[in-house]
Amino acid sequence: MEVTARGELTLGEILARHHRQVALQNRIVSSFRGWQRLRLLVRVAELDRSFELELGGPVFFTPDLGRDWELREARVNGAAWPVEELPELPLIQPKAPPVPPLALELNPSYRYELLGLGQWEGRSVYVLAYQGGEGLERRWGRAYVDAATFGLVALEAWQQSPKQEVRRSRTVTRNAPFQHDGSPLWLPWKVDGDDVVASFGSIATVHRELNLENLELNHPEVARGRAEAFRGPRPMLRERRGEVVFLEPDGAGGRREASSGRKRQSFLLGGAFWDSSLSFPLPLLGYQLLDFSWRGDQQLRLFLAGVVNDVAWSRPGTWEPRAQAFLQLVPFTESLWRGEHEVKGEALYLWRQKLRVGLARQLGGFRLGAEVGADVLHFSRTQDTDPAFRLPKNTVETVAQVQALWQRGTLLAGAQWERGERLTWRRWGFGERVEPSFSRTTVFARYQRTPWPLVRFSLGFDVATSQNADRFSRFSLGGLGGGASFVGLPGGRVHADGLAVLRASLALPLPAGQRLEVTANAGWLRVRPEGQRAAPVSGVGVTLTRRGPWGTVLEASLGLPMVAPGPNRPVVQVVLLRPWR
């Protein structure tokens, strides 16, 4: 939108005419009903994983109660889900800074400015800017008032609050024109929003798309429809003056506003993982806790799976301290490949335990963080290790890291630099060089888009380089979790001093409430000690998501290396995830 000219009316005159239009609209619109759809796309930066939720159902509006929404349809990661069994997910409606209802009230805490006449999606509008707050606590935006009717066409709102759960947000509200007995009305139609939310010492990005369809004004069945929804078993939400709360049964056939939504959720995890680096399928059985209000003002994340275990803690604020620990109870096999062939006799078992502490701060659209810590490395022989192969010395590896993240809409980009040094190290193997210190640099970006309902397109890239890296500090691709977001590669097979990787995926709906995601990735790798030039690597994968047994979400994935060292054997993973309490 571009402002083209300054209008002849003053700011006060425009606001006065707008308020008259709002008063007329309030007298005409005593109620409405429609069908509301919400699509949420949540990405946790640290885990490089996304979560998708879609909700739909009838909505009932009256001025005294606001907008009440009954949930009748739900999809979790594209799979159909009974609304009665939906978990209370804290990121659906995180706590955000307050905003004025329309940003057009003459509130002394806000400053307003008339920017002039402009165009918004083909309509002539007056453009009004507003801002409020002080220091890092800021709220600002633009309102677009129709030049002919003085109704609110759209509102762009930005908020920034490092001390709140929502660190930064942008919301675009669009209203649609209606006519009622010759009177022009502007009623809600669509809301798009992007939030940056504090998440266990890192951030989660939340993209929201809300659409209101089939709007019916002053319908005589609004009161009866709302009363039936109140008596029904389905969950309900209420939106009033920009705030959303859950409605709980009051025991007398009605609903009341819940005092506060839960800020924690736990999950049970089960399944199996197998690739050619494992002699048998690795069972996955564990428990995950996401607590956004642990001990009031702290956050705690637990992942306990026996084989691998992880805990993360943080205290959100202007300066955000965090701590994280990783415990590995079962060793992973580390093998060495040169070109298409495995180097015989050099496979070994590796245990790696991690401890990190750090500090981060949100500055506008950027999040800057630094952390220090230590890794404990323990090595042992496999059945195939050559007796003449000298095991590396068990050691402690100190680590220092700085990171910057940047978010805009559904685009998340970042850069990270890391330096490590082993306190005790010696010549190992068959006389490999000793490099007790190393450094690594990574740049990455992730982008997601939902061009149509239930369809999701994702694109990402990683570029990384290192100095003095050896077999245990190079970048790893593949395996459980997919290093560098690479699918289709067995773990422990591909290590590189530098890489450039591109990944694309497309998720499509299937009948019976299922969804299929197809992923392809390709890249170039460089391993300096072997003197190789950059070598290609690629893999493909498919993932089926559906409702599983015992109230679970089932994800079954199959990956296959296309261009990679060693035989092209599949990577198989089956995961059942069940909300617990």
Image (cartoon, grey):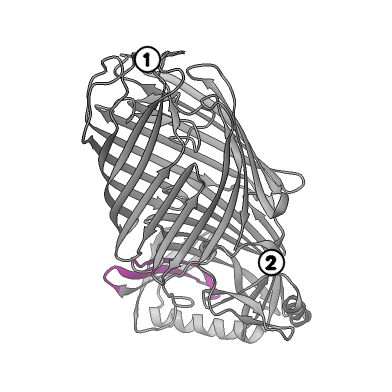
Query: What kind of residue is marked 1?
Result: Pro
Residue 64 is left or right of residue 132, and the answer is: right
Q: Main secondary structure of the magenta part?
A: strand
List the residue tagged with mark 1.
387
Query: What kind of residue is marked 2?
Result: Leu
Say whether residue 166 is visible: no
Image quarter (top left, top right, bottom left or bottom right) of the N terminus: bottom left
Q: Is residue 569 magenta?
A: no
Q: Residue at x 66, y 54 (%)?
A: 75
Badge 1, how many Cα within 10 Å: few under 14, some, many 20+? few
Of 293 and 226, which appears nearest the observer? 293
- Circles 2, 1 touching at the beta carbon (< 8 Å): no
Q: Is residue 146 above or below residue 249?
A: above
Dot placed on the residue nearer the N-terminal end, 2 or 1:
2
Say whether residue 302 is visible: yes
Q: Is residue 238 above or below residue 24?
A: above
Dot label at residue 71: 2
Q: Is residue 113 above or below residue 378?
A: below
The boundaries of the magenta stretch are 134-162
Residue 127 is left or right of residue 121, and the answer is: left
Residue 313 percent coordinates (x, y)? 38, 58
